[in-house]
Image (spheres, rainbow, N blue to C red):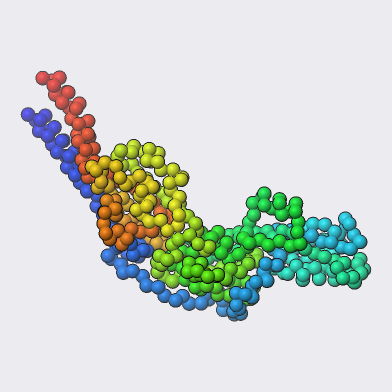
């Protein structure tokens, strides 16, 4: 009799465990980033006009067009060609600007080249050669040209996903070989631009003040509006020079219009997925691999759940649940939200509950209550089987 009571209690415990529901995720105040995350303990942040960065104090504000000459500015790693009339192998030849920004030429010595126009460096080279009585004052007697414009290192900070030092305009080895083997009079590296640097820093975040991006160079700065990248038109996209500093202020709010591929945002995001729900036995069986975790920027949670094979299948598993793990870049606090998969599919208010996926987000799927109950029965059978067998043997 006691063994039967024990078995009954064991069966009830297993079945009740299968009916239990998970507690809702807890989140600290300040974790909310998007309106679609639907936390009631914090109001939606409102946008504000950011102030001028303190670092611009004492600098002269100029129009973005004032930096247009930077396409001709020399930078470290640039390849130059010097041609001196009447000379074939002493001075005439190719040179590379060193990491310290200097150009070393025989007889001429070291010349500061980085951050200067090609014409200015050419004038200095000619002046030194004239002073040494090595050339005559003949038009075109000394000619310096830029064979290759290498990538430049700049700083990007503020409301971007990966702030820090980035290289804008870095070319692949094949492209560099083609440029060097087929030299032309000058070179234009389209990747040495403001937009390329922003993309290299992960792209601007949805809270960026896109109408007020600051570009600092030397004792000058410009304020650049990059919103035409989303609304249409031709945004200012000045060429960069080594050592430039880019500051993207935050507006303090989430702006869904900026969550899509553009010239100043990343084309896609990598999201971590897990689907161990039935009938899948592993993430591999769910078809989750590197191809299914890379999404276009602007993908929402429900689309990611489809990629994770968390939608569809048996009606018994229609009540699946999913959690999204994200982080508020303004406060640094992580947030975990739970959603009913079928609720996102069937609900008319799905857009209000369907967050946009950010870089580095993670999602996991859970079985429906029906499948959990089936698993509980299976567990009870596994537990009761040996006990029943042992009881029968005793009899």
Q: Compared to 131, does 284 lie above or below?
A: above
- Which residue is located at x 43 percent, y 62 percent? 259
Residue at coordinates 24% horizontally, 47% vertically from top-left?
Answer: 319
Where residue 219 sits, quadrant-wise, is bottom right
In the image: residue 67, left or right of residue 347 = right
* Viewer-closest of 329 and 369: 369
Q: Position of residue 348 (x, y in %)?
A: 27, 59
Q: Quadrant of residue 67?
A: bottom right
Is residue 273 visible from the viewing direction of this image?
yes
Q: Answer with left or right where residue 135 lies relative to residue 332.
A: right
**Position above or below: 327 against 173:** below
Left or right for 346, reference 57: left
Q: Residue at x 87, y 63 (%)?
A: 84
- Percent coordinates x, y for residue 198 in the rendering: 54, 63
Percent x, y of residue 216 = 59, 72
Residue furthest toward the front?
Answer: 233
Quadrant containing the C terminus is top left
Determine the residue located farthest toward the left in the rendered image: 1
Q: x and y percent of residue 10 in the render?
A: 16, 35
Q: Nearer the viewer, residue 382 or 69?
A: 69
Left or right of residue 318: residue 110: right
Quadrant containing the N terminus in the rendered view = top left
Give the image quarter of residue 387: top left
Q: How many marks?
A: 0
Identified at 32% across, 52% down, the residue is 323
**Looking at the image, can residue 59 be seen?**
no
């Amino acid at each position: 009799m006691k063994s039967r009571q024990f078995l009954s209690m064991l069966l009830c415990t297993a079945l009740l465990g299968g009916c239990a529901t998970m507690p809702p995720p807890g989140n600290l105040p300040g974790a909310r980033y998007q309106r679609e995350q639907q936390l009631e303990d914090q109001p939606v942040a409102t946008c504000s006009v950011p102030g001028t960065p303190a670092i611009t104090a004492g600098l002269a504000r100029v129009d973005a067009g004032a930096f247009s000459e930077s396409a001709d500015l020399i930078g470290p790693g640039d390849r130059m060609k010097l041609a001196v009339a009447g000379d074939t192998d002493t001075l005439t030849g190719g040179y590379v600007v060193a990491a310290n920004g200097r150009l070393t030429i025989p007889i001429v010595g070291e010349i500061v080249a980085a951050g200067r126009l090609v014409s200015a460096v050419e004038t200095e080279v000619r002046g030194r050669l004239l002073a040494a009585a090595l050339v005559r004052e003949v038009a075109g007697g000394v000619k310096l040209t830029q064979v290759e414009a290498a990538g430049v290192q700049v700083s990007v900070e503020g409301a971007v996903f990966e702030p820090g030092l980035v290289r804008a305009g870095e070319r692949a080895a094949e492209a560099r070989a083609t440029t060097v083997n087929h030299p032309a009079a000058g070179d234009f590296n389209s990747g040495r631009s403001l937009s390329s640097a922003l993309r290299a820093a992960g792209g601007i975040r949805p809270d960026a003040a896109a109408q007020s991006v600051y570009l600092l160079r030397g004792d000058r700065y410009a304020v650049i509006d990059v919103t035409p990248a989303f609304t249409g038109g031709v945004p200012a996209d000045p060429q960069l020079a080594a050592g430039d500093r880019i500051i993207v202020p935050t507006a303090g709010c989430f702006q869904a219009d900026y969550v899509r591929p553009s010239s100043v945002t990343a084309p896609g995001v990598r999201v971590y997925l897990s689907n161990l729900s039935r009938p899948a036995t592993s993430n591999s069986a769910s078809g989750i691999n590197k191809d299914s975790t890379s999404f276009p920027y602007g993908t929402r949670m429900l689309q990611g759940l489809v990629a994770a094979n968390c939608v569809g299948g048996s009606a018994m598993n229609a009540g699946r649940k999913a959690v999204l793990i994200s982080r508020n870049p303004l406060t640094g606090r992580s947030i975990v939200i739970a959603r009913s998969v079928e609720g996102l599919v069937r609900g008319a208010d799905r857009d209000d509950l369907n967050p946009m996926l950010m870089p580095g987000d993670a999602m996991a799927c859970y079985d429906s209550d029906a499948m959990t109950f089936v698993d509980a029965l299976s567990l009870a059978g596994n537990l009761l089987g040996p006990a029943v067998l042992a009881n029968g043997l005793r009899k």
